[in-house]
């Protein structure tokens, strides 16, 4: 049977060992289940056999990290190679969005299937996710999630504010290639937005929150969701994108409508806890925002028990059930 999709698994190797191992193994399993290829770009090798492309990226052979971080830079997973998987090793690149974009463009140029499905290194995807995406890409150029996206940390599962996260995107190869190469041409070294632009309404929100002191964040621009009722639309994403010359993925489909209880699950950890993610948790936990955003749970209807996702856990393969 011909393969119609390639999973792009991209990583900087800076992650807890158990988590990186399990997300990569589940990507391998998803590829097998869906008869898809797996294209891995990593700063350092993840499989026993790999292709060194560091000269193309200008990547460093050494991690060049402070001692406190060296043990978190995983270089020796040494997974057995898979027949339909390939690992391109870029060398150590700067930890910034441009490096991610360069990895994605390289992957597009080395992909020979019609469809591309993005898998981030700290995310878990439903077992049948690739097949669900493939069905929609028969009619659409891009798929993504808004509300079918959840996070987990030591407190349990929590609902993210609906947003088209990069890790939820899939697309036709030609469409992805055009979008990512245009971004590199537009932005140069400082990438303002990695995600493809999909049509959605944007609203302004004033958020009050406290961490012992009262704070006010006025007029934050957010995607309009069902929780916003009759809130006035401030702008449309495609209008704002056109102002900076972004390609707009008009022929796109939000997977929320077909995933049901299934969703993408991102693990919140110290190495992805950027200022914005930290602020998000502070705001959600300590503000008057909608209850839907602040709700935490130890059990998820698809992913099962939250405990199995802690870094110290044995972390069995996470599909379904407890």
Image: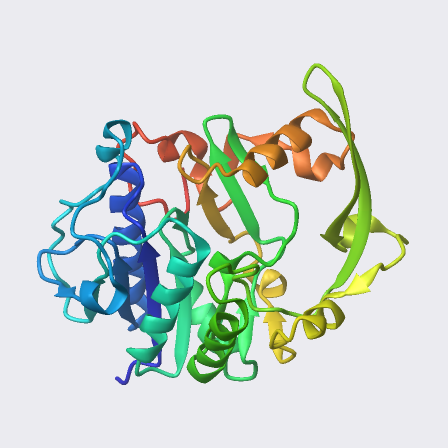
Where on the picture, by quarter, is residue 20? top left
x 66%, y 71%: residue: 244
Rendered residue at 30%/80% (across/down): 3
Can you say whether 313 is above or below 28 in the image?
Answer: above
In the image, taking residue 44 as reference, residue 4 lies left or right, namely: right
Q: Quadrant of the C terminus?
A: top left
Q: How is the image coloured?
A: rainbow
Please name whichever residue, 250 or 302, is drawn nearer the observer in this view of the structure. 250
User: Considering depth in this image, is 201 or 5 the residue closer to the camera?
Assistant: 201
| Residue 279: image location, x then y, percent | 61, 34
Q: Position of residue 316 (x, y in %)?
A: 28, 40
Q: Position of residue 50 (x, y in %)?
A: 13, 63
Residue 87 higher or lower than 36, as above or below:
above
Residue in the image at 55% along x and 60% along y: 259
Residue 128 seen in render: no
Quarter of the image with the N terminus is: bottom left
Q: Is residue 199 above or below residue 178?
A: above
């Amino acid at each position: 049977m011909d393969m119609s999709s390639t999973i792009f698994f991209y990583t900087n190797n800076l992650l807890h060992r158990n988590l990186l191992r399990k997300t990569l193994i589940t990507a391998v399993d998803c590829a097998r289940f869906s008869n898809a290829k797996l294209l891995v770009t990593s700063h350092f090798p993840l499989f026993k056999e790999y292709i060194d492309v560091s000269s193309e990226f200008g990547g460093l052979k050494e991690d060049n990290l402070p001692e406190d971080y060296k043990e978190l830079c995983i270089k020796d997973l040494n997974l057995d190679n898979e027949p339909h998987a390939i690992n391109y090793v870029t060398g150590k690149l700067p930890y910034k969005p441009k490096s991610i974009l360069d990895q994605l463009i390289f992957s597009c140029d080395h992909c020979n299937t019609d469809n591309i499905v993005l898998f981030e290194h700290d995310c878990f995807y439903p077992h049948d996710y690739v097949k669900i995406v493939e069905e929609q890409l028969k009619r659409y150029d891009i798929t993504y999630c808004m509300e079918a996206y959840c996070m987990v940390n030591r407190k349990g599962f929590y609902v993210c504010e609906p947003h088209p996260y990069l890790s939820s995107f899939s697309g036709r190869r030609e469409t992805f290639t055009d979008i990512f190469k245009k971004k590199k041409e537009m932005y140069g070294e400082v990438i303002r937005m990695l995600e493809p632009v999909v049509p959605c309404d944007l609203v302004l929100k004033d958020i009050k929150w406290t961490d012992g002191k009262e704070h006010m964040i006025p007029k934050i621009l957010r995607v309009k969701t069902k929780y916003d009722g009759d809130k006035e639309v401030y702008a449309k994403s495609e209008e704002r994108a056109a102002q900076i010359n972004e390609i707009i993925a008009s022929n796109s489909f939000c997977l929320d409508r077909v995933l049901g209880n299934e969703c993408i699950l991102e693990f919140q950890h110290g190495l992805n806890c950027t200022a914005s993610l930290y602020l998000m948790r502070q705001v959600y936990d300590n503000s008057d925002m909608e209850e839907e955003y602040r709700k935490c749970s130890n059990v998820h209807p698809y992913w099962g028990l939250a405990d199995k996702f802690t870094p110290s856990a044995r972390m069995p393969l996470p599909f379904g059930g407890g």
